[in-house]
Amino acid sequence: MPKAIVFTDFDGTVTLQDSNDYLTENLGFGRPRRLEINDDILDEKITFRDGFRDMLESIPLPFPECIDYLLKNIDLDPGFVHFYQWCEKQGIPVVVVSSGMKPIIYALLKGLVGQDAVENIEIISNEVKIDGDKWEIVFKDPESGFGHDKSKSIREYLVKHNYSPNTTNLQTDGNPILFYCGDGVSDLSAAKETNLLFAKHGKDLIKYCIRENIPYTEFDSFKDILEKVVKIVEADGKNIGEFLEN
Ligand SMILES: [Mg+2]
């Protein structure tokens, strides 16, 4: 059994920019409209699923051109490669749990990290349906207001690998230590599912955690995450409480 499993958001967490926001702001209806929708999602006036679909529908470029555009413009978190290599060496799975679309995540991971990354990192995400120059997002969980219910994906992953799906803060219950790393609204559905939530400094996920009294620990980059994960894994998770904020 691995000592830990790291579930992570992709956009804005593994990468510095959110690729879907980037497409919306630069090729779609632009930043002011995107921020209005973002506020409506945070205020629960519309669901993430519907707001996100509106943003993507404003992007006129064919899908392969979107991927090329992102490969030229999106940067990787400066600590991610080292973090991923350390996890590989320790036998700790890194699992991407994303509200983005799989071909974009695959292309960015391959382009920014390397071929071995797409072979070793499982991607659980939404898909895309392409029809000529037109494309649309295909939600993994269309019945969920999140489009992709990340908590469901984490529980499904645990059951598939014969671990207990009943996760709570601090109690590892014979499971590997479970971490989740995220930054935004799409991570709200995963925020309570693991033993420790890493929430990105200054981003929406922290606002939500404070509002809902969800414990988390902050990070700026995967350098911070690596430092804390190493300490926690070395202590078999017994020191997780020392890292909790909120
Ligand atoms: Mg994100």
Image (tube, rainbow, N blue to C red):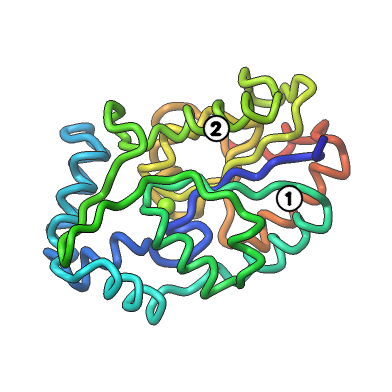
Residue in the picture at 47% in, 68% down: 108
Tell whether 29 sits left or right of 224.
left
Displayed quadrant of residue 246 = top right
Q: Residues within 10 Å of mark 2 (few under 14, many from 20)?
A: many
Of residue 215 and residue 99, the one placed in the foreground of this image is 99
Residue in the picture at 68% in, 30% down: 161
Tell whether 124 sits left or right of 197.
left
Q: Secondary structure at mark 2?
A: helix
Q: Farthest residue in the front direction?
A: 132
Of residue 189 and residue 72, the one placed in the foreground of this image is 72
- x, y percentage for residue 206? 45, 43
Q: Secondary structure at mark 1?
A: helix
Displayed quadrant of residue 33 = bottom left
Instruction: Tell me how many marks there are.
Output: 2
**Can you identify the residue that label 2 sits on?**
154
Q: Check the image and report above or below for 14 versus 175.
A: below
Q: Amino acid at mark 2?
A: Ile
Tell whether 85 sits left or right of 199.
right
- x, y percentage for residue 213? 48, 27
**Can you identify the residue that label 1 sits on?**
228
Instruction: Give me the disc on residue 98.
Output: none
Q: Check the image and report above or below for 118 versus 139.
A: below
Q: Amino acid at mark 1?
A: Lys
Task: Give the alpha-carbon distance from disc 2 to disc 1, as whole Å.
Answer: 21 Å
Q: Residues within 10 Å of mark 1 (few under 14, many from 20)?
A: some
Q: Check the image and report above or below for 179 versus 164.
A: below
- x, y percentage for residue 5? 69, 41
Of residue 96 and residue 243, the one placed in the foreground of this image is 96
